[in-house]
Amino acid sequence: MSSNRDLVVRCPFDDSIYGTCTSTTAEQVPASIARARRAQATWAAAPVTDRARVFRRLAALILDNRDKILDTIQAETGKARLSAFEEVMDASRAVRVFAGSAPGLLRPRRRAGAIPVLTRTVEHHRPVGVVGIINPWNYPFNLPASDGAQALLAGNAVVLKPDSQTPFTALLLAELLTGAGLPDGLFQVLPGSGAELGPALVAGVDYLMFTGSTATGRQLATACAERLIGFSGELGGKNPLLVLDDADLATAAAGTVHGAFANTGQVCVGIERAYIHQSVHDEFVDRLVALVRGLRLGVGYDWNLAVGSLSSAKQLATVSAHGRPCQRQPVRAERQCVVRAPRARGRRPAAHWNSERQRGLCRGLGVARRSDGWHGRVGRRTAPRRPRPAAVHRAADGQRPAAAPDPRRRSWATRATRQ
């Protein structure tokens, strides 16, 4: 029996209960921030090389525990294992790169003085204090690992508010950080409602990193501006792809498929529209359709699935609403692509797209002609149906191979001061 303060996490594969954890209240947030602030004072005094050593160990621990991380990510988000693998490898690579770069980036630097010869200026990087991170459900491990690593390497403490759908992935990251040697209190996870915890977090931290919707980002930026604290937002996008007349079409088509359908299309930087030069349009569409037809849709922990489940029944309803106008009135659909998901045996997954919804959308891509010789394509993305195996919270080690990572990332949470 769960209490009112229990946060119930459901698996998108079949809407079964994956687990429950205690939800943080708004009244508990100030105490967590105060604890982080006490730990941060000692951490900021440590040499950057000592901090970097912790994150080199974290990068190795991520690889050593990849199966456990993959299973947890999939159970909470429903993404395909290959998409989860990209996330895990990206996190390990990014953390290792940040650990290697931090000592050089954060060292004091001589600058030209106001009066040459007579004055001297030295630039120092000081941590801001306690950094709040509000993270979405689509990348529950990579984003807090990379954002948190940068803030912690710069000498800050971190208080993370994960999405209510993915608290166990965030708690697993905290467990790995402890195993890497991060001192107690420096990285805290506060599961719970964003509407309840967001204002309390903004009221107490010294800097806020938010990844999520543009509407919520505006509200948080305004609240941070009222307190005159720093704010960084990675918000939603409507991202175009250009295919010019001299493009390598095989590469362009493959890149479009990955850019549009990775993580079941649930990516803020995913391709949602493309502009194709008229001279290469037909060949490009043929190549694109052939690749999309070859995508294997399904749910489960198999490596041979390319597109997994949508993240929730709520997300399914949102995508369905996007698709209905395209089905009622397609935009001169000159190509038709039907991607059929495997026939389900047993229960129907809770967040899937069936082949009838996909019919005629070319995975939702309608074609429009323009007088300037370009074609515009508008994208919507879908996900599959197929039965899900039993949820696995702790996977056996050594069952799945590793692969080359591919990193990214963002700015350091520091402020520069001059003396």
Image (cartoon, rainbow, N blue to C red):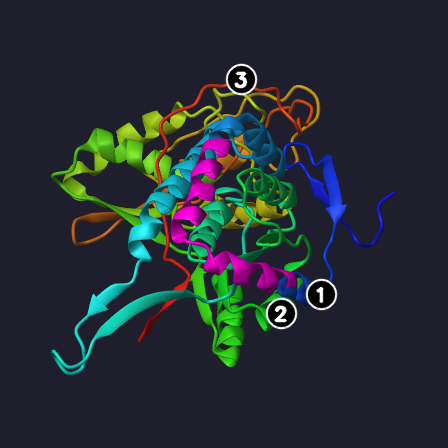
Along the polypeptide, which appears first: circle 2 or circle 3?
A: 2
Q: Is residue 338 above or below residue 42?
A: above
Write the start and end of the magenta stretch as one range.
35-62
Q: Which residue is mark 1?
A: 26
The label nearer to you, 2 versus 3, is 3
Say whether residue 79 is left or right of residue 282. Answer: right
Mark 1 is surrounded, within 10 Å at the Cα level, by few (under 14), some (14 to 19) or many (20 or more) other residues, namely some
Residue at the spot 44% in from the left edge and 62% down from the top edge: 233
Viewer-proximal residue among 75 and 400: 400
Residue 239 versus residue 355: which sits nearer the camera?
239
Q: On screen, 227 above or below 414?
A: below
Amino acid type, callout 1: Ala
Q: Is residue 54 magenta?
A: yes
Residue 296 coordinates in the image, percent (x, y): 46, 23
For residue 75, above or below residue 390: below
Quadrant for the N terminus in the image? top right
Q: Say which residue appears at 40% left-offset and 64% top-offset.
A: 414
User: Under tag 3, what secondary structure?
Assistant: loop
Dot 2 corresponds to which residue? 199
Q: Position of residue 144 (x, y in %)?
A: 51, 49
Magenta-colored segment: predominant secondary structure: helix
Cβ–Cβ under 8 Å for marks 2 and 1? yes
Tell me how far mark 2 sits from mark 3, CA to CA: 43 Å
Name which residue type carries label 2.
Answer: Pro
In the foreground, 279 or 83: 83
Give the residue displayed 12% in from the left and 78% down from the top. Answer: 117
Q: Is residue 331 left or right of residue 14?
A: left
Q: Is residue 355 visible?
A: yes
Q: Which residue is mark 3?
A: 398
